[in-house]
Image (cartoon, grey):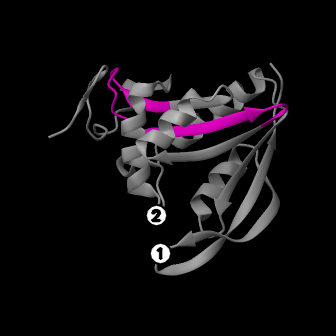
Amino acid sequence: MSQDSPLGPLSGPPPFNEKLLSLLWAVPAHAGPIASLHAQMFPMPWDEAAITGMLAHPGSIAMVASQGGSVAVGGFALAQVAADEAEILTLGVAGEWRRHGVARRLVEAIKRAAARSGAASLFLEVAADNTAAQALYKATGFAESGRRKGYYERPNAPSQDAIVMRAKLVQT
């Protein structure tokens, strides 16, 4: 049985519908759905408490992709601003929502929000074997700026390097 939140019943995202897509600022009621989606995508997922803590952090920028005003989350991006730098900490899009530009929209929204918060640069890390994400980030203005050897540890698989990427932000 699923829990209910102040925004409605908690469940997975509905089938993707471009006409109903909204990017929203994440609120505490989104923490559970974000954590649930994160757990489907990452081998070492963040739990609801970690997401709630991130949302409460004063330097946090957090966006969700949703449809129809529901708390259901089809995508998310969590970032943090410190001084004149920002970092995308995690980003994900539900399987059936992929290949519709949702991740690109989330990245662009984070870039705009980080620039408005005074950041001059936005960083992220991506696994060396995640070529789809690397292509997305390059298409949205990121370039490789470093590498962390063996950074991503994976159960029953070899560790992967993290490619550090950076985008210069335009102040608005």
The label shown at residue 155 is 1
Question: Which numbered circle lies on residue 99?
Answer: none
**Of residues 123 and 168, the one drawn nearer to the viewer in this rendering:** 123
Which residue extends farthest left?
1
Give the mark count. 2
Image side of residue 10 versus residue 28, left or right: left
What's the amino acid at mark 2?
A: Pro
Distance in Å between CA atoms under marks 1 and 2: 7 Å
User: Is 57 included in the stretch rendered in magenta?
Assistant: no
Q: Is residue 103 left or right of residue 47?
A: right
The structure residue drawn at horizontal position 48% and vertical position 60%, both measured from the top left corner, is 44
User: Could you say which quadrant of the image residue 34 lies in?
Assistant: top left
Element assignment for label 2:
loop
Tell me which residue sits at (56%, 39%) in the image. Answer: 77
| Front one among 15 and 74 | 74
Q: Is 84 colored magenta in this rendering? A: yes
The answer to whether the residues at label 1 and label 2 have Cβ atoms under 8 Å apart is yes
- Vertical arrangement, residue 63 with respect to residue 138, above or below: above
Would residue 93 be found to the left or right of residue 105 on screen? left
Along the line of sight, the residue nearer the viewer: 111 or 56: 56
Q: Is residue 32 above or below residue 157?
A: above
Give the image location of residue 102, x and y in percent.
Answer: 50, 39
Which of the pair 72/140 is nearer the observer? 72
Is the N terminus in the top left, top right, bottom left or bottom right quadrant? top left
**Can you give x and y, in whole percent of width and height, for residue 140 in the image?**
70, 43
Instruction: Name the amino acid, label 1.
Output: Pro
On residue 43, the disc is 2
> Where does residue 83 sit, x and y in percent of width and height?
83, 31
- Whether residue 97 is visible, yes or no, is no
Q: Residues within 10 Å of mark 1 (few under 14, many from 20)?
A: few
Q: Residue at x 48, y 49 (%)?
A: 46
Which region is colored magenta? 64-85
